[in-house]
Image (cartoon, rainbow, N blue to C red):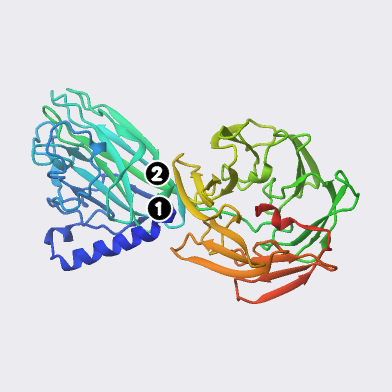
Amino acid sequence: MKRFRVFLTIAAAAGMAFSLFGGIDMTRVQASTAPQTLPFSQNWADTGILTTNDDWSGVAGIVGYRGDDLTTSTGTDPSTILADGSATPIDVIANQENPDTLISGGIAEFEITDRVVALQGSGTADAPHLVIHLNTTGQSNIRFQCDLRDVDGAADDAVQPIAIQYRVGGTGDYANVPGGFFPDVTTGGTATQVTPVDLTLPSDANNQSLVEIRVMTTNAIGSDEWVGIDNISVTGGETPPAEKAFVDYDGDGKTDLSVVRNTGGGENGQVTWYNQLTSGGIQGPNFGIASDAFVPADYDGDGKDDVAVWRPSEGVFYIFESSTDSVRIEQFGQAGDDPRVVSDYNGDGKADLAVYRPGASSGEQSTWFYRTEPNGGTYYVPWGQNGDVPYVGDFDLDGRSDILIKRDSGGLANFWIKFSDSGAYASASFGLTTDRFLMADFDGDDITDVTAIRDEGGQLVWYTAMSSGTNVIVHTFGSSDDFPIAGDYDGDGKNDVAIWRPGSPAEFWIWNSSNSALSVELWGGANDYPVASSRIY
């Protein structure tokens, strides 16, 4: 995942140094391995791109390898072969006309009616494969498509499997793409079977300078058959921002100064929102009651956060949608749920109704519930247990929120994250259980960073684990009586360290990331509550 990017970069650099000082392999000049940007496609209709044996220099971004000794057995499942094969011979048998009679194994180019490049295993070509080199920078949801064509009409009827694999950074083992194993893609005596492939790569392939996709077969038991790899297509979606500026009511990309005040008095007193917009003007809607949870977000997708509350006594969201100036009322959840996990779970640019429901008793399963359309169906994900604390963030840059829980581990905070696209999970320890935590992007790479805020001797110390590096950034900012209210107040795409200090008047203290300057704004009163603090707990 993204947290391993530095390790992969270091590993790639080490691999480069090895190749530079380990001698020159002259066969490597017969390949074009420059990573190709998306969208990428390749069919084999052009007979001019492969004209000479073992020369891939005319094919941008694709190289064929014979795979000698990647396995020493016949009938090996190719999905079990994860080792790099780039040290095996580069291979292509060019200008062939009849797959039925070519018995050599490896990779061949067939100039048949529907020209194609194909793979076939043999006693020498133990695991022949194609490697496609891609640059996915700025792209997410990487989609790989191709057709696996049985082009061998001979009587041979081997079990001919195909595995689709990938790796990031150009070094190390490959990993299997989920759903990318095809146990037998040929039929003896015919050359008509076509197996379409349509896969989405795991999220660690998003936004990378080098991703390699590998298509591999192996030496089958019996007489192998030629499998064409045709109509290759790799596409992606432009990576959406992981988060908008929090508490941005006017859509200018900057966090607005916002406090709520119990103007009605008592637990169920009327609440008034006082919002000072960075674009100018003041909003002061009466919305909600004092016992509500404050959950502002962009529910209608107009680029502006909507004033919103969730009422625990009813399990109901009340949302004042800015696009229509109307109130949306929707039942979702029940007493005891936690609505702080409202976020965009499907990447459509709209906040989804969501609650986290703790397990009924200590150690019992907790469940996340979310709804992506007004009054639509409900999705649920079992994750965490009673006693855990839930958070959300986009940690894999796919534009969809991932879910994570914090669990006490002997006084240390242990986080367990479940990624939105693949369902894979990871864990990491960071901070103390007694810290307050914030999930927000502080380095502007659109990947959520984890910040622990700790009271040390009456001062607030902010520890941020940046996704863009291995260092923890530390800021001492604020006192124990202040409210941390990080947000993007200067509109540079990075969250700013900030606090709200109660008083008459109250003060917003903001450390602007764009110029490292301190600004102080007067807004609110001694008994107000700063809305931007609602996501820090």
Q: Nearer the viewer, residue 318 or 529?
A: 529
The label on residue 261 is none
Residue under numbered circle 2: 201
Instruction: Note whether 346 is above or below 209 in the view shown.
Output: above
Q: Position of residue 55 (x, y in %)?
A: 16, 54
Disc 2, SS: loop
Q: Residue at position x 21%, y 30% from top? A: 160
Three-letter code, disc 1: Leu
Q: Position of residue 418 (x, y in %)?
A: 49, 42
Disc 1, SS: loop
- In the image: residue 86, left or right of residue 236: left
* Residue 310 image-quadrant placement: top right
Question: Is any part of residue 142 visible from this angle?
Answer: no
Q: Tell me if mark 1 has few (under 14), some (14-19) or many (20+) residues whose alpha carbon lies within 10 angstroms of its own.
A: some
| Mark 2 or mark 1: whose residue is earlier in sequence | 1
Q: Residue at position x 19%, y 50% from top? A: 50
Q: Tell me if mark 2 has few (under 14), some (14-19) or many (20+) residues whose alpha carbon lies within 10 angstroms of its own.
A: many
The CA distance from mark 2 to mark 1 is 14 Å
Question: Is any part of residue 389 visible from this angle?
Answer: yes
Residue under numbered circle 1: 38
Q: Nearer the viewer, residue 81 or 198?
A: 81
- In the image: residue 501, left or right of residue 412: right
Q: Nearer the viewer, residue 25 or 75?
A: 75
Q: Residue placed farthest to the right in the image?
A: 264
Three-letter code, disc 2: Leu
